[in-house]
Image (tube, rainbow, N blue to C red):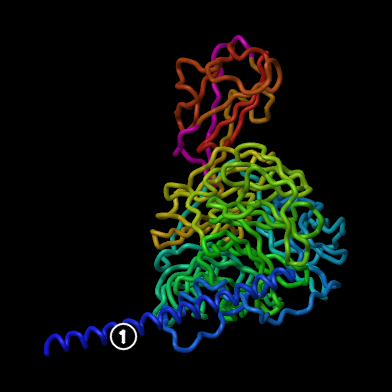
Amino acid sequence: MFSILLASTSAEVRSRNSQILSMRCLWALALILIIACLAVTVHAQDAAGGGVPFVKPFTRPLGITDEQWYELQRYAPRNRVAAPKNLRTLDTTASPVPFVSFPLVPGSVPPGSGDFLLTVNGSQFVEASTINWNSAALATTFVSSTRLTATVPAANVASAGTAIVTVSSPAPGGGVSNILRFTVTTPSMSLSFGRSTIDLGVSPNSVVTADFNNDGKLDLAVVTNEIDPNCFQSAPGMVSILLGNGDGTFSLASNLPCGARRASELFATTVGDFNGDGNQDLIVIINSFGLIEFEVFLGNGDGTFTYSTNDGGWDGMGPVITGDFDRDGALDIATPVDFLGAGVIEIWLNDGNGDFAFKSSMTTGTFSSIVNEDFNRDGILDLANSWTGSCDWECYTVYLGNGDGTFVPASSQPTSSGLLTGDFDGDGIPDLIGEGRFVKGNGDGTFTDIGPGPDFLTAGYRFRGPIPGAIADLNGDNKPDVVAIGPSNNILLYLGNGDGTFKPPISVAVGQSPDSVEVGDFNADGKLDLAVTNFEGNTVTILLQTEGYVASVRPPIKSDGSSVFRANRGALPVKFTLKQNNAATCQLPPATISVRRTAGQPLGLVPEDVYTMASDNGTNFRIDSCQYIYNLAASALGVGKYRVDISINGIMVGHAVFALE
């Protein structure tokens, strides 16, 4: 009886296992057929030209589990189906959205300056494009599709402050460009910051600046992993809108609505006017059940936002950048993605209402970041990317735009790539920097690797996260500077020399594990400030720029540079007093000097061992009676003219000029 029961039970188990195996085989076969059909559709339409619109996920098949639905979405060709979104017909007569290149020329003048000519370089300008100063149109001269000029009246720069410069083009199409900041400030030889901290949820990882409530004051949008109890399953991830008070402080106004978010974290956000209503909108990168997507939130103009749409479904996604890539008057987006372990740059076109559809893709390495510029100066936006991971296909750094949302590799590729783009050597042609190199643009889409550039621009870069750096003219000297995330709870400020080289970095302490940085004039004093998210510190650091240090030469050397001494006099004392924030101070930090011969032989820097005297210790000043004192060995210097520069934290803060005869 027992053996019969055992045999019967074993037979039932074998039968049930056979049924389960058959069901699994049928499911696997169905999954394979679905993937194959989708792949055939994709390949057929890709072969027909231009790729297939990348639309929202297809309908979930009946009778499958949550895990099976996840796997189907994960391993199918990312929901690329034949049914496109309703993209408007491309209007070849439309004006494209203009693009403004960094820097403006000039990008800064002292308060009280007279009328001056402003040159705006960029791309996609038309003859009717106008330069705007704080939204007011200036009388503009069209030079080419990549250059405009306008005279700025003296009244606009009578007092210190920061102006918003944009370019607008008329309808049909057209619209307003990205913004650049013009500072009205006295150039500074040093940088100094006051620091404050905003406690803001769990693991803030991305910050952007814009005027979200249209009051003329810069606001912040900060991505955190704070749990939002109003969202599905109390999903971690929140975007907080902090409205600026105009004095460098901020007030929490609202959080973005939940949108389509279902689970996991948020990574980064991008700002732009995606529906053309004049209000700033946001695109947020999200993790939804292990698939990376983007969500679009349309600004209401009062600091609040309305959820619009979501798209995507990748294993990874890099920072989103914006530009009118098909020249139809609507801001499109480009983003690097991890597509089943391979690096791809995808272009998504905007229908003008803030809804996006896939247009084209280009191969790249994994862990890529991208920037857009007009590298060959043909009036059409191009792309450059910097990738640090593996490359499974042909990978290129520079792609030149065709003006329809598609791109082709440049004929000659640079040997190094960059995370940031701008004109760093003052020739009017965009360059690349990053990965410790300066890559000079030649103006035809090709580049020349010149030499070392700011390092740490790739340090801490997280795929799906923000670019860890920014460009700006921090000290108002009309030379582009670079801000990078440092390795030791700090940021690094690289002041540019205007020729593609940079001074040694200035380290500024922030919070624990800084993750992203944004630049803006938060207190409207004409000096650019910084906002830094601190991932492990759960804070945002606000760095308001102050006046910094200014050293003034004291007798026996005259401040007007007319001093003449005997070359055989022995010691020549060089003395400086110091101001900080325009106030005299006796709190004198360590300072160093350098001596340069400007007339006589040989010209240039004088070696330290030539002018050092036993009474002084190398290049270090002695401090006595609230002043720096350094005794130069005049007899060793010899006949000639000399300039002595005093530096604090690697930044020159003053100088003395004299002659020996």
The residue to which callout 1 is attached is: 16
What residue appears at the point 78 percent right and 55 percent down from the top-left corner?
120
Q: Residue furthest left?
A: 1
Q: Quick one: label 1, few (<14), some, or many (20+) residues within 10 Å?
A: few
Does the segment drawn in magenta span residue 428?
Answer: no
Image location (x, y in percent) of residue 360:
68, 67
Nearest the viewer among 172 and 497 is 172
Nearest the viewer among 260 and 550 is 260
Which residues lie in the magenta part?
A: 566-591
* Amino acid at the residue labelled 1: Arg
Label 1: which secondary element: helix
Residue 158 visible (yes or no): no
Q: Residue furthest top?
A: 568
What residue appears at the point 52 percent right and 42 percent down from the top-left corner?
506
Does the segment drawn in magenta span residue 576?
Answer: yes
What residue appears at the point 66 percent right and 66 percent down from the top-left corner?
347
Residue 345 visible (yes or no): yes
Nearest the viewer among 592 and 221 is 221
As drawn, is 249 to the left or to the right of 128? left
